[in-house]
């Protein structure tokens, strides 16, 4: 029987154009927004001032110290940070600064993919990555995962099924450290297994590490890229979650042959210079202390949203405590369709991400949803989850009472 990719590949129309911005609703649990109250404004203002004093007149040119590849002092700082935090050893020539992780995703796709190519993704994964694959007419296949990451036997099974119908995976897209949407951290054993499978099947790996700075423990396993001796792992990082998403500064790390191709594909004449030079001034003195404070705040908000879910949904809401980041992945009983719940909640001023948009097979996310706790205040977290439970009760009878459910 032919392998039916439709059972694995997300389909659907491109999302409609965004409506004009009218401000956030009262309870905004979507997107990847940071905590405004945690932005280190005095330090950023001072860094921006020093940056303009040092490099301001160079903004009159396109080539601000290596142009499209990125501001060299920023890349020099990244070389040291990557070595100490991820154990990746590289040079400035192995790094290209991008306009956020979004451009990093697009560059990888431009270099590696043609329409009709197949990418293997985790069963639950970054929604925008799937949207962009859809936009360029590439297919993607989800692989089952658990708390330790992609399940190697399931990955082998999917690769064999693809081969049986004459298709070959171009690369594996993974978010191993503080996974989006689940908040899990891939075990070291799975990292080795994933790279071993990639080597045996001659595949590339795209390692998205954009949330990895924000682990509750303050530690992390080595990046998959550190295990790579063949140049098959492309690594992506970002300052959107650790500093601010509006800065739009991300980066790719890879061996030079890929970086050279990515530079050819990067046709924007260079990412925003003011953001790069400001970060280069801010990061050496302030990054570690800022991230420690930010992570502590996010951990408090994570605890608050778990308490709110327990109090308002009781045992109706199942979730695994995240190991870092700004998201929590929640599963409700099978009677609840979270796409319909999201619509009803929106009418009540509550924004949530329905699970169908964050899984490769939409049916597996039908009863789940993702909440971002980075931006809301503690009061908004408590009240918003309580109101969401009321909406869910009215629409689906879950939880069993519309009032708060006391934790057993």
Image (cartoon, rainbow, N blue to C red):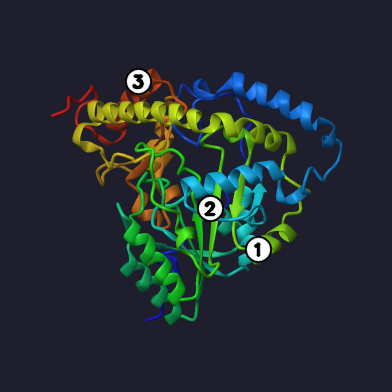
Residue drawn at 24 percent across, 34 percent down: 397
Q: Which residue is mark 2?
A: 129
Calculate the distance from the C-alpha at mark 1 to the C-alpha at mark 2: 24 Å
Q: Mark 3 or mark 2: which is in front?
A: 2
Up/down of 33 relative to 229, above or below: above
- Picture coordinates of residue 309, whole percent (x, y): 28, 30
Q: Which residue is mark 1?
A: 256
Calculate the distance from the C-alpha at mark 3 to the C-alpha at mark 1: 50 Å
Q: Mark 3 or mark 1: which is in front?
A: 1
- Picture coordinates of residue 100, whole percent (x, y): 61, 43
- For the residues bearing labels 3 and 2, Cβ distance under 8 angstroms: no
Q: Residue furthest left?
A: 408
Q: Nearer the viewer, residue 52 or 388?
A: 52
Side (left or right) of 240 relative to 319: right
**Mark 3: few, some, or many residues within 10 Å (few <14, many ≥20)?**
some
Q: Which mark is residue 383?
A: 3
- Picture coordinates of residue 67, whole percent (x, y): 77, 48
């Amino acid at each position: 029987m032919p392998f039916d990719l439709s059972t694995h590949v997300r389909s659907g129309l491109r999302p409609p154009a965004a409506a004009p911005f009218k401000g956030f609703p009262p309870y905004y649990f979507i997107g990847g927004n940071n905590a405004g109250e945690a932005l280190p404004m005095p330090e950023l203002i001072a860094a921006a001032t020093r940056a303009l004093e040092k490099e301001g007149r160079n903004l009159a040119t396109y080539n601000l110290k290596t142009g499209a590849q990125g501001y060299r002092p920023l890349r020099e700082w990244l070389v040291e940070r990557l070595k100490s935090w991820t154990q990746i050893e590289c040079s400035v020539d192995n790094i290209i600064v991008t306009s956020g992780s979004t451009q990093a995703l697009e560059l990888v796709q431009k270099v590696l993919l043609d329409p009709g190519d197949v990418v293997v993704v985790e069963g639950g994964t970054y929604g925008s990555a799937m949207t962009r694959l859809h936009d360029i007419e590439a297919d993607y296949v989800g692989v089952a995962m658990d708390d330790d990451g992609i399940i190697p036997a399931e990955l082998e099974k999917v690769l064999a099924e693809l081969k049986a119908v004459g298709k070959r995976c171009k690369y594996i897209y993974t978010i191993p450290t503080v996974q989006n949407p689940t908040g899990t951290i891939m075990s070291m054993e799975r990292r080795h297994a994933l790279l071993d499978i990639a080597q045996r099947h001659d595949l590339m790996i795209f390692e998205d590490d954009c949330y990895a700075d924000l682990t509750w423990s303050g530690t992390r396993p080595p990046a998959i890229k550190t295990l790579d001796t063949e140049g098959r792992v492309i690594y992506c990082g970002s300052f959107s979650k650790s500093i601010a998403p509006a800065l739009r500064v991300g980066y790719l790390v890879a061996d030079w042959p890929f970086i050279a191709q990515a530079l050819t594909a990067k046709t924007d004449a260079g990412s925003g210079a003011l953001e790069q030079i400001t970060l280069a001034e801010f990061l050496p003195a302030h990054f570690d202390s800022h991230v420690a404070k930010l992570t502590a705040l996010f951990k408090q908000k994570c605890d608050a949203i778990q308490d709110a879910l327990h109090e308002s949904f009781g045992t109706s809401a199942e979730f695994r405590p995240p190991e870092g980041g700004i998201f929590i992945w929640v599963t409700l009983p099978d009677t609840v369709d979270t796409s319909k719940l999201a619509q009803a909640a929106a009418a009540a001023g509550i924004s949530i991400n329905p699970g169908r948009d964050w899984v490769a097979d939409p049916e597996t996310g039908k009863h789940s949803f993702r909440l971002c706790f980075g931006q809301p205040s503690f009061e908004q977290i408590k009240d918003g989850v309580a109101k969401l439970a009321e909406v869910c009760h009215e629409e689906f009878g879950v939880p069993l009472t519309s009032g708060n459910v006391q934790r057993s």
